[in-house]
């Protein structure tokens, strides 16, 4: 709760003028003179310095208030500035200072009303009223502090969530870029090696390999553009890779691939993207480690999961790229499956290699 000079001015005018009026209804108290005005102005002046000297300002205000009452000036408006400063002290988190100051002030008024005040005594109800007002002020300050800290915590959590989402988006883009580059560059390398090997003996086969290289290079440029467009304002947030492009992926792989789909149903975007990338990475591994093999790709749509199986029969020719690659292919596929709550198993199967992924699917709605 920030104070302004205007608020301090309003409090000063109110305390001085209203205290003059309060004196008419309290004939047993002294009229407000020059000293009384000075004591009444201590609180408003302290409000101007409370941001730099919060504890000193509160102490000066409470001491001036106690002195004002001890001299015998009228009760009433003098308590406005202490109320404001006590509330601010608690709400800004200086709880211990505020509670101790309140306890000392209450103890002073107890001593004053019992032993120091001239007859007639204000009585115990007067002290109880002061204590109740102080407790009410402190409770209101605690509530204000709690609300302010709650808003600050909410803002902090929202900022952390924003940073986490941005980090996840960067990781997703990095994974997409890895998969796109790994698959297409491996395919280009394999086909380039084939073309160089056959260019003299079998030009038609070399031409086919070069055509595949052309298509793969065009594909990688298109996918890179779609991933990088995510960084541009207003660009679509969903990647373009999907199972509707699986036929093109198989055709460009340069492998002897049989593709079979059992059943069909709409898939969530993240499941479809993960399935495409798992098949893509599996074909990349087959091209790298098992050239010339026969590869089977099977997608089975079950009620609660999508089962992806990619297996090869083993290399028929020496593996050109068997020792190359980042080594992140299978771990990356496992991460994609695990991120969706699924599983992925990869390992030798007879003379070849087999990858099986199970991705959970939501229940179909009629």
Image: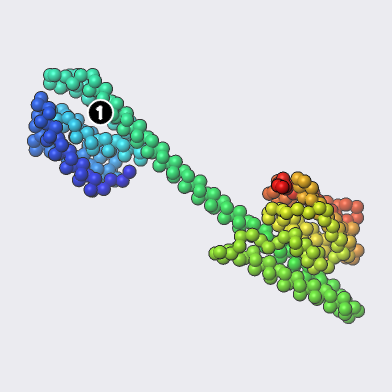
Q: Which residue is mark 1?
A: 105
Q: Which of the pair 144/352 is nearer the observer?
A: 144
In this image, 33 relative to 66: left or right? left
Residue displayed at 68% across by 66% down: 223
Q: Is residue 321 visible?
A: no
Horizontal arrangement in the rendering, residue 29 relative to residue 65 (left or right): left
Q: Residue at x 26, y 48 (%)?
A: 4
Q: In this rendering, would 101 be left or right of 184? A: left
Q: Quadrant of residue 292?
A: bottom right
* Residue visible at 31% across and 39% down in the picture: 88
Q: Say which quadrant the N terminus sits in.
A: top left
Name the quadrant containing residue 17: top left
Q: Is residue 122 placed above or below 23 in the rendered structure?
A: above
The percent coordinates of residue 2 (x first, y second) are 31, 46
**Residue furthest out toward the front:** 366
Q: At 15% from the left edge and 37% from the top edge, which residue is drawn?
A: 18
């Amino acid at each position: 709760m920030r104070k302004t000079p205007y608020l301090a001015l309003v409090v000063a005018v109110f305390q001085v003028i209203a205290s003059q009026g309060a004196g008419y209804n309290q004939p047993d108290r002294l009229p407000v003179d020059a000293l009384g005005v000075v004591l009444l102005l201590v609180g408003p002046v302290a409000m101007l310095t409370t941001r730099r000297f919060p504890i000193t300002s509160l102490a000066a205000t409470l001491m001036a208030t106690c002195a004002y009452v001890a001299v015998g000036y009228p009760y009433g408006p003098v308590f406005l500035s202490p109320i404001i400063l006590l509330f601010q002290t608690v709400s800004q988190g200086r709880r211990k200072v505020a509670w101790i100051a309140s306890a000392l002030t209450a103890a002073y008024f107890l001593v004053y009303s019992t032993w120091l005040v001239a007859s007639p005594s204000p009585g115990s109800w007067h002290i109880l009223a002061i204590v109740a007002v102080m407790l009410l002020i402190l409770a209101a300050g605690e509530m204000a502090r709690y609300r302010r800290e709650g808003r600050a915590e909410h803002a902090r959590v929202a900022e952390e969530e924003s940073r986490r989402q941005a980090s996840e988006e960067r990781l997703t883009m990095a994974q997409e870029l890895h998969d796109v580059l790994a698959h297409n560059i491996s395919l280009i390398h394999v086909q380039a090696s084939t073309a160089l090997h056959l260019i003299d003996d079998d030009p038609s086969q070399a031409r086919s390999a070069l055509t595949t290289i052309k298509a793969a290079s065009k594909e990688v440029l298109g996918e890179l553009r779609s991933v990088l467009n995510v960084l541009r304002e207003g660009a679509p947030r969903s990647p373009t890779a999907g199972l509707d492009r699986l036929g093109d992926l198989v055709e460009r792989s340069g492998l002897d691939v049989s593709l079979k789909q059992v059943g069909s149903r709409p898939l969530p975007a993240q499941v479809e993207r993960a399935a495409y990338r798992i098949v893509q990475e599996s074909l990349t591994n087959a091209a790298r480690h098992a050239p010339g093999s026969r590869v089977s790709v099977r997608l089975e749509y079950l009620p609660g999961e999508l089962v992806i199986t990619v297996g090869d029969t083993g290399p028929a020719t020496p593996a050109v790229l068997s020792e190359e690659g980042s080594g992140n292919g299978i771990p990356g596929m496992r991460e994609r499956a695990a991120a969706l709550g699924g599983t992925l198993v990869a390992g030798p199967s007879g003379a070849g290699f087999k990858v099986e992924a199970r991705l959970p699917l939501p229940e179909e709605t009629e």
